[in-house]
Image: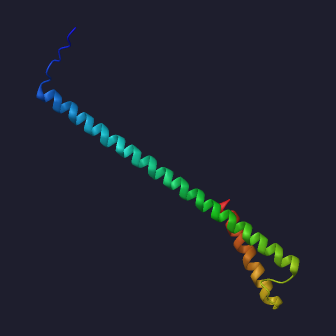
């Protein structure tokens, strides 16, 4: 059994070639969008992890300062109170905006 191929006319061939090229370009654009979205998602996850660790670090600092009644080895009580107040405000800001 022999298979005979019909020769395609040049016009039809060019149309199919253009369709294939346009499909390739569309696929590349879709892949670019997917990669961009994955990068954005990874960046957001890293930012969220950083924010959560920052909140935990500040909470720990406030807890330790209340427990020891000293803050960062400072002996000036007035300064310690101002610093605690600023840290509490910063903690509230982080929790409101990022959680």
User: Outermost residue, left direction?
Assistant: 10
Q: Position of residue 94 (x, y in %)?
A: 68, 67
**Residue 4 vertical placement versus 70 (above, below):** above
Residue found 12% across the figure and 25% down from its top: 9
Query: Residue at the front extreme?
Result: 1
In the picture, measured across the screen, residue 75 lies left or right of residue 23, that is: right
Image quadrant of residue 72?
bottom right
Which of these two is toward me, 31 or 94?
31
Q: Residue at x 31, y 40 (%)?
A: 24
- Closer-to-camera residue (15/97): 15
Quadrant of the rendered structure where residue 88 is? Answer: bottom right
Residue 35, position as x, y percentages in the image: 45, 50
Nearer to the camera, 2 or 6: 2
Q: Quadrant of the C terminus?
A: bottom right
Residue 90 vs 36, above or below: the answer is below
Spot occupied by residue 95 in the image (x, y as percentages of width and height): 70, 64
Residue at the image position 82 percent from the left and 91 percent from the top: 75
Q: Is residue 81 left or right of residue 98?
A: right
In the rendered image, residue 22, in percent from the top left (x then y), is placed at: 27, 39
């Amino acid at each position: 059994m022999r298979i005979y191929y019909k020769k395609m006319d040049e016009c039809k061939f060019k149309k199919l070639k253009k369709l294939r090229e346009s499909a390739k370009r569309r696929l590349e654009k879709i892949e670019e969008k997917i990669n961009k979205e994955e990068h954005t998602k990874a960046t957001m996850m890293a930012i969220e992890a950083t924010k959560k660790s920052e909140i935990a670090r500040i909470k720990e600092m406030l807890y330790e300062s209340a427990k020891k009644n000293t803050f960062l080895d400072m002996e000036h009580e007035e300064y310690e109170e101002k610093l605690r107040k600023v840290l509490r405000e910063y903690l509230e800001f982080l929790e409101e905006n990022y959680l």
